Image (cartoon, grey):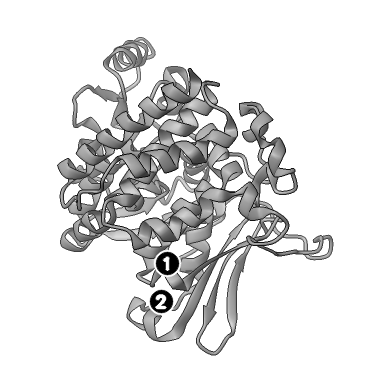
Amino acid sequence: MRQRITVLGSTGSIGKNTLDVVARHPERFEVFALSAATQVELLLAQCAQFQPRYAVMASAVHARELAEKIKSNGLPTQVIQAHDALETIASHPEVDSVMAAIVGAAGLAPCLAAARAGKRLLLANKEALVVGGEVFLQAVRSGGATLLPIDSEHSAIFQSLPEDPATWAGRVDKIILTASGGPFRSRPPASLRDVTPEDACAHPNWVMGRKISVDSATMMNKVLEVIEARYLFGLAPAQLDVVIHPQSTIHSMVQYRDMSVVAQMGTPDMRVPIAYGLSWPERVASGAAALDFHALSAMTFESIDDHGHPERFPGLRLAWESLAAAPGTTVVLNAANEVAVQAFLERRIRFDQIHALNLETLSAVPSSNPDSLDALLDLDAKARSSAEQHAMRMSA
């Protein structure tokens, strides 16, 4: 029997790579539902190729346009238009697995719905844990869901850990997340005020969406990954480390009590962790190229404290600071960063002002120990409003 899959965010980078892996194994996987924000033509093409039962778009206008085109093309897919449409396709009784690839806090509600419904949840949305925290983990536990990380770093850690999570606390000394350093690893910190959105989105190793590319350039993606790792693997913040590894060959490592280190390596291709998540505990062909060890260049590592990195990536310390602060602080940080990145992409603030905007929002919005989805979303909205006000002042 084939595994029925809902892909949330199917027109983004992760979504497209997921469908590429799915298409390689028609005997194993079946697309049940797809969702997108605004890319009507691409979602239409995906519906034509995979013939899902349902499709969802973020806005009613785009949903009507998609529905008309699906009808005119004689496709069987039904377009759902409802405020809870994403939750519906994420928790549908006939769905086995959900690929959560919606960027930002917008992906939290369908992730919670999938968790409560006991789905196999392939988590590519960092914010489900950064924003959802214990609320999300409780939904996973109460629903009996299977949570599988898709970020390359967290998948690497998952693959490097013992199979039994009950043994992690006794065996693991620390987790080491690797970071490429992005496009500005060697750029003089003083020149960062002149960075353009085009500069920031030109990642040297990975093909990613614009928001994630900017997060990589500021290292805020690593901040979110440290927070996510804290919740995924249940270790103390002091057991989480970050090292810069420009080649992106080692995707992350686990150091054990005996000081041995287990690392996961591979080409920088998101189809590898996606294929692992889809087929776990088995493995299937991903379509990625194999590492050529005969031609592999030297692998190098840099401390985040060396060569001016603290000045170049001032936001990185916010990972540990927010985890040590009151519950809800990570919600505020994530919301502020989403607003800051969008303001930068719209050329309303400078690249070097992203960190300043995040700090100002953290100072202005008190955390409120949110214990429900409504409380999380309320705090998220307050943080966004505050961050937007700061962005307007910066751009004045």
Q: Residue furthest bottom?
A: 258
In screen coordinates, is 118 left or right of 325?
Answer: left
Which quarter of the figure has residue 59? top left
In terms of secondary structure, where does tag 1 sit? loop
**Location of residue 125 in the rendering, given as x and y in whole percent from the top left corner:** 39, 46
> Between residues 93 and 228, which one lies in front from this camera angle?
228
Residue at the image position 43 percent from the left and 49 percent from the top: 27
> Between residues 196 and 176, which one lies in front from this camera angle?
196
Mark 2 sits on what residue?
Answer: 163
Label 2 neighbour load within 10 Å: few <14, some 14-19, many 20+: few
Q: Is residue 291 above or below residue 25?
A: below
* Badge number at residue 369: none
Asked if residue 310 shows in the view, the reply is yes
Total labels drawn: 2
Q: Is residue 94 above or below residue 161?
A: above
Residue at the image position 42 percent from the left and 48 percent from the top: 124
**Location of residue 151 in the rendering, given as x and y in whole percent from the top left corner:** 48, 53
Contact? badges 2 and 1 (CB < 8 Å): yes
Callout 2 amino acid: Glu
Marks 2 and 1, Cα distance to the nearest angstrom? 10 Å
In terms of secondary structure, where does tag 2 sit? loop
Callout 1 amino acid: Pro
Q: Is residue 102 above or below residue 240?
A: above
